[in-house]
Amino acid sequence: MTSATAGSFEFDHVIIGGGSAGCVAAGQLSADPRVRVLLLEQGDPAEQHPETLRADGYKDAFINDALMYERFSVPQAGCLRRPLFMGSGRGMGGSGSINAMVYLRGSAADFRAWDSPDWSWSAVEPDFRAIERVLDVHRREPTEFTEAAIGAAEAAGFRRQHDLNDGDFLGGLGYEWMNYAGDQRRNAYVGFVQPHLDRPNLVVLTGAAVHRLVFDASRRVTAVEFEHQGALRCAQVRREALLCAGALESPKLLMLSGIGPRAQLVAHGIAPVFDLPGVGENFQDHPNVTLFHLARRDVDCNYPQVYGFHRANPDTSLPPDQADTCFVVYPARSSFREAFMRMLPALTVPPALYHRTRLPRLVRAAVSLGFRPAAVRALVRRIYGLVVVLGKPKSRGSVRLASARPGDFPRIDPAYFADPEDMDTMIKGVDLARRIADGGPLRAFGNTELLPGRWAAGQRAKAAFIRAMAMTTYHYAGTCAMGQGVGSVVDDRLRVRGVTGLRVADASIMPVVPVSALNAPSMLIGYKAAAFLREDAT
């Protein structure tokens, strides 16, 4: 990474977080040689973990502890009082370096819900196209199994959608776009930062743990305080700081800096700079469950490349053109072993012991050993899942401080199924996934249901399955919501209310979470943040 010791430690813009939004913003802002940019990332350089740069390396990256923040939620009343794993990516590229490279813009209805002309579908579509010219997104080739899955979905009432990025999701299913080219992952780091590391006006500093933002008496950001190589450092901000740490860390950093609900700040001994009650509220995530099936022969694809969106719950109050549920066709051979290695320790080791003992490593080693026999590997090649994702949750959770120590994870409450309509929609989503599995093409391929099994036939049994098996889809959003109302944290140009010189640009600003994956919209947010900063500077 570029050295941060040369020259003045004063910058026009300091960007906190080298994830999808932060990398795009850094690349765009530093394109102007007159603008000096510092990008701070707590994790490692991407080059230190080559699997983050390979298209087929996502399953290896997913089980690399150096690339994952291993957080847990508070016990979830809607999930049998289970504390749920709430991990996210760390290192250059953030979660965009360890995900399955799903590149979906979202639907026009998703962006209409953000209620801003700057963020309407017509306003964001050109920006998406600009990002895609850099990333060179692709779709993977059809296989016999993926075509059988699409045919079965058509029999269940879906339409084959030839372009899942055309803005109209409702009832469509097809091959999703992925940000890869050949054998290379084309994420925000690879596209927007890596080619420009030699820019003299761009300083990228990894291993930099931000403690807080510093404000002057007029509530203007003047500096960013961070720890690097054991020393506390301070980067001066000439123009504006950009907070791109994600929906779990951005609200935490705001609160540590004195921006947030006054009572919560005072309770942790933090001097309030501005009382902003919406910080950390409005938390949204996509819970999911997977119905696993056994085919009669090998599933012949290596990526979850088929996605669909439907209105599983006709009784919801969502607009009529808004899908409420996402369906993913998951070939187990793509990452079944790695998924078990990551998730089984989180399911079996109590959070209190997770970071203090070797138990997670022991469980992971046992899982790896269990997948070694040839018979097990052969069985996995015949398993596929239909993932049911609650795309438009009505429940709202929160992210709050656990302490005033910067190194402590926040207190995370996704509040899964707090709104009864969410469970109703999930049950109907399970019903629709079963209709897909029963479709003629998948019936011919083989569709023996392994989980939950046909015993889960009634409403109560399906609800019990969902409560026992629900997990995150790692789509955290909403905790620094954009808007004009009392609960909003940023305006529609991403400026934090009550202070100057500070914007938030990541999935935390989404007032309503899109029904699809968040990586492409997060890159969009970073792209638009850079545009806003350039426009306002003139």
Image: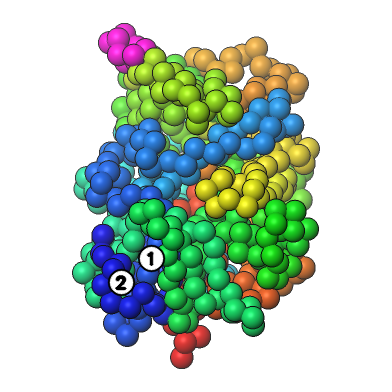
Q: Is residue 280 visible?
A: yes
Extreme bottom residue here? 538
446 left or right, relative to 482: left
Q: Say if the magenta span includes residue 281.
A: no
**Label 1 or label 2, whichever comes before in sequence order:** 1
Residue 196: x percent and y percent? 25, 68
Residue 275: x percent and y percent? 74, 67
203 left or right, relative to 70: left
Instruction: Give the camera-side residue of 160 and 40.
Output: 40
Rendered view: 212 above or below 528: above
- Please give the name of the residue rendered at 54% of the width and 63% of the height, measured from the top-left corner: 212
**Label 2 is placed on what type of residue?**
Leu
**Secondary structure that dominates the magenta span:** helix
Q: How many labels does the image show?
A: 2
Residue 90: x percent and y percent? 41, 48
Residue at numbered disc 1:
39
Q: Quadrant of residue 26?
A: bottom left
**Label 1 is placed on what type of residue?**
Leu
- For the record, the magenta segment spans 369-378
Rendered view: 196 above or below 499: above
**Quadrant, the N terminus:** bottom left
Helix or strand or loop: what does disc 1 sit on?
strand
Give yes or no for contact between labels 1 and 2 (Cβ–Cβ under 8 Å).
yes
- Please give the name of the residue rendered at 38% of the width and 27% of the height, measured from the top-left corner: 338
Residue at numbered disc 2:
202
